Image: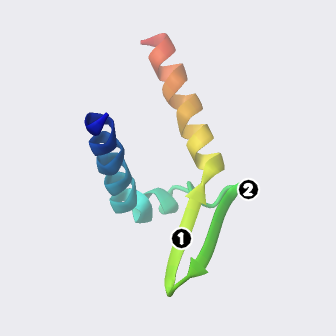
Amino acid sequence: MLRWWIVVLLALLLINGLNPWLRRLGLGRLPGDFQFRCFGREWSFPLASTLLLSFVASLVAKFV
């Protein structure tokens, strides 16, 4: 169980670090991606982008 928490934490840190680069590609600004400002910080929940990336990853895995 602890191993999964570490993997999730590392994935979130990686996504957070790549967020400016991914925004230039248009990910994070799709309809269904939620952004709001709270406590002086901008928070985003990229639901549509996550679904799109998951679909692309599954297609790549299927054909490889």
- Mark 1 is on which residue type? Trp
Quadrant of the image for the N terminus?
Answer: top left
The residue singled out by tag 2 in the image is 31
What residue appears at the point 59 percent right and 48 percent down from the top-left corner?
49
For the C terminus, the image quarter is top left
Q: N-terminal of the two: label 1 or label 2? A: 2
For residue 36, side relative to residue 23 (left or right) = right
Question: Farthest bottom residue?
Answer: 40
Residue drawn 65% across the image and 47% down it: 48
Identify the residue shown where x is 50% and y is 87%.
40
Which residue extends farthest right?
A: 31
Q: What residue type is labelled 2?
A: Pro
Residue 34 on image: x %, y %: 66, 63
Q: In this view, does 29 lie to the left or right of 24?
A: right
Count residues near mark 2 (Cα–Cα under 10 Å), then give few for <14, some for 14-19, many for 20+.
few
Outermost residue toward the top in this view = 63
Numbered circles on residues, count: 2
Q: In this view, does 11 lie above or below 21?
A: above
Q: Where is residue 32 in the image (x, y as percent from the top left)?
A: 72, 54
Q: Nearer the viewer, residue 51 or 24?
A: 51
Query: Which one is in front, 34 or 55?
Result: 34
Foreground of the two, 41 or 22? 41
Residue 32 left/right relative to 3: right
Q: Is mark 1 on a helix, strand or loop?
A: strand
The x and y percentages for residue 61 are: 45, 18
Where 49 falls versus 3 (above or below)? Answer: below
How crowded is the residue under tag 1: few (<14 C-alpha within 10 Å), some, or many (20+)? few
Q: Where, by quadrant of the figure, is residue 45 drawn?
A: bottom right
Residue 43 got which mark? 1
Task: In this rendered view, identify the residue nearer to me: 40 or 20.
Answer: 40
